[in-house]
Image: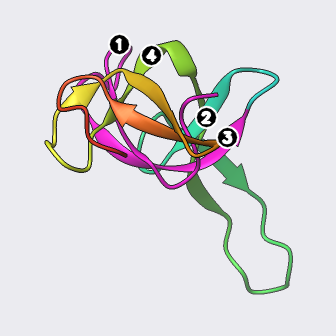
Amino acid sequence: MKIKKGDTVLIISGKDRGKQGKILDVFPKERKLVIEGANLRKKHTKPRKQGEKGQVVETPAAVSLSNVKLMCSKCGKPTRVGYRILENKKYRICKKCSQEI
């Protein structure tokens, strides 16, 4: 996968189109990722202890990898990811500014 945990991405399709967020979790086998503050789902919780109230908790759900674009940390634009191999080490690069991500 070209996108990793901690990267900033732009959502390009779906109900949260145009939002940016940091990646919290990645699921490579399902090709999905969880983005902070995007694709929020509501979960109703019961009170567990006496005197405690039930509540509605919003948690981010997974988004398909094909619905996001990586934001370049150097130029600040949404971009595709390329690779450059130098001295037996593989680096991710921005396809727009050719800088290392």
Q: What residue lies at 58% left-to-right and 56% top-to-bottom? A: 57
Report whether 73 appears left or right of 59.
Answer: left
Q: What residue lies at 75% left-to-right and 29% top-to-bottom? A: 28
Q: Which mark is residue 13?
A: 1
Circles 4 and 1 in contact, beta carbons < 8 Å: yes
Q: What residue lies at 19% left-to-right and 49% top-to-bottom? A: 74
Q: Secondary structure at mark 3?
A: strand
Q: Nearer the viewer, mark 1 or mark 3?
A: 3
Report whether 101 appears left or right of 54.
Answer: left
Does label 4 or label 3 sit earlier along the sequence?
Answer: 3
Report whether 46 appears left or right of 78.
Answer: right
- Mark 2 crowd level (few <14, some 14–19, many ≥20, 10 Å Cα): many
Badge 2 amino acid: Leu
Residue 60 x/y as whole percent: 55, 44
Circles 1 and 2 in contact, beta carbons < 8 Å: no
Does label 3 or label 2 sit earlier along the sequence?
Answer: 3
Q: Which residue is mark 2?
A: 33
Q: Which residue is mark 4?
A: 67
Residue 100 x/y as whole percent: 35, 45
Examine the rendered structure and indicate whether residue 77 appears above or below residue 43. Answer: above
Circles 3 and 2 in contact, beta carbons < 8 Å: yes
Does label 4 or label 2 sit earlier along the sequence?
Answer: 2
Cα separation between marks 4 and 1: 5 Å
Badge 4 amino acid: Asn
Q: Which residue is mark 3?
A: 26
Cα separation between marks 1 and 3: 18 Å
Residue range corresponding to the magenta coloring: 1-27
Badge 1 amino acid: Ser
Q: Secondary structure at mark 4?
A: helix
Badge 3 amino acid: Val
